[in-house]
Image (cartoon, helix red, strand yellow):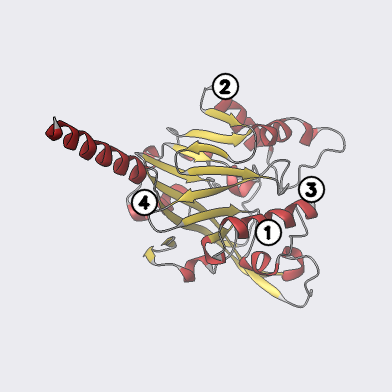
Amino acid sequence: MKYIQILFILLFIQINSYAQNSNKYEVFAIRFATEKGRISLSFAAAGASEKDSIQLCDMFWLLVGNGKHILVDAGYPLNDYNKDWDSIYIRPDSALLRINIKPEDITDIIITHPHEDHVGGVNLFPSAQIWMQKDDYDYFVGAAWQKNGFNEGFYKEDVKNIVNKNLEGKLTLIKGDSIEIYPGIRAFIGSRHTWESQYLLVNTKTDNVIIASDNSWFYYNLENLIPITHYLFDPIAYLNQLKRMRVLQPNVSLIIPGHDPLVFTKFPRVAEGIVKIR
């Protein structure tokens, strides 16, 4: 009888250990475009001097774990909307090939918000299930294009693409704050970068990582608790979420902003333009 009890306890420990490990992810940042020039810091941080400037890059993120290859945002392919952007560019699916990840390997894409540089690449990954906040989706495909709607940063072809994903059954809409998308991945809202943009808290083997995306453009925003000045519905809401992120993860380095090249100097390089967040 004792032998059976010991076996049961060992089996419980093994199952519990597996469940805990399966909720942990490896997190990678992938840079696919770097602006050749610099932008005024006042564009990215309220109250900053117009004489100061900062470099900007475009990135997305890969989460590996729990039997999944999940992208956070999808970058963009070159199109009529962005073809004149002055940047050094590689298409997102080609960037992933540097670590032997093929487009069909991507199981899911979590869209933080539907600006062109974050949602434009969804069709590059045909097998992926798309995740998006319902209120953000509704505004993106509807009210943004009505009179007095705000659609700066949106591309009409992306609206058609995301609607088609919905029609194909490849879009899952979530609604609310602190929503667990998968075990170990939790979505938060409130910054109002777009109508209902979201950011993610991701469990890793060593610590929790926050993928802020454009809910903080740069480490500068996080360190100084200063909101951006453009593409924004509510600067107070944005500021409050910067503060909240710093409570959720006090180590600011592990809060990953959406456009800061410093991300690629803070963490170990695994391939050209790719670092592992840890």
Q: Amino acid at mark 2?
A: Leu
Q: Amino acid at mark 3?
A: Phe
Quarter of the image with the C terminus is: bottom left
Label 1 and label 3: CA atoms lie apart by 17 Å
Q: Which quadrant of the view contains residue 11? A: top left
Q: Label 1 crowding class (10 Å Cα cut-off): few <14, some 14-19, many 20+?
A: some
Q: Amino acid at mark 4?
A: Leu
In the rendered view, tell whether residue 13 sits above or below residue 225.
above
Q: Label 2 crowding class (10 Å Cα cut-off): few <14, some 14-19, many 20+?
A: few
Q: Is label 4 in a helix, a strand or a loop?
A: helix
- Residue denoted by label 1: 243
Q: Label 4 crowding class (10 Å Cα cut-off): few <14, some 14-19, many 20+?
A: few
Q: Is label 3 in a helix, a strand or a loop?
A: loop
Label 2 and label 4: CA atoms lie apart by 29 Å
Residue 45 spot, x, y in % from top left = 74, 66
Of callouts 4 and 1, the N-terminal one: 4
Label 3 and label 4: CA atoms lie apart by 36 Å
Label 2 and label 1: CA atoms lie apart by 38 Å
Of callouts 3 and 4, the N-terminal one: 4
- Residue denoted by label 2: 167
Residue 184 spot, x, y in % from top left = 45, 44
- Residue denoted by label 4: 97
Identify the residue shown where x is 64% and y is 60%. Answer: 217
Q: Check whether the beta carbons of the residues at disc 4 and disc 1 lie within 8 A of each other.
A: no
Q: Check whether the beta carbons of the residues at disc 3 and disc 2 lie within 8 A of each other.
A: no
Dot label at residue 233: 3
Q: Label 3 crowding class (10 Å Cα cut-off): few <14, some 14-19, many 20+?
A: some
Q: Amino acid at mark 1?
A: Lys
Residue 17 spot, x, y in % from top left = 30, 44
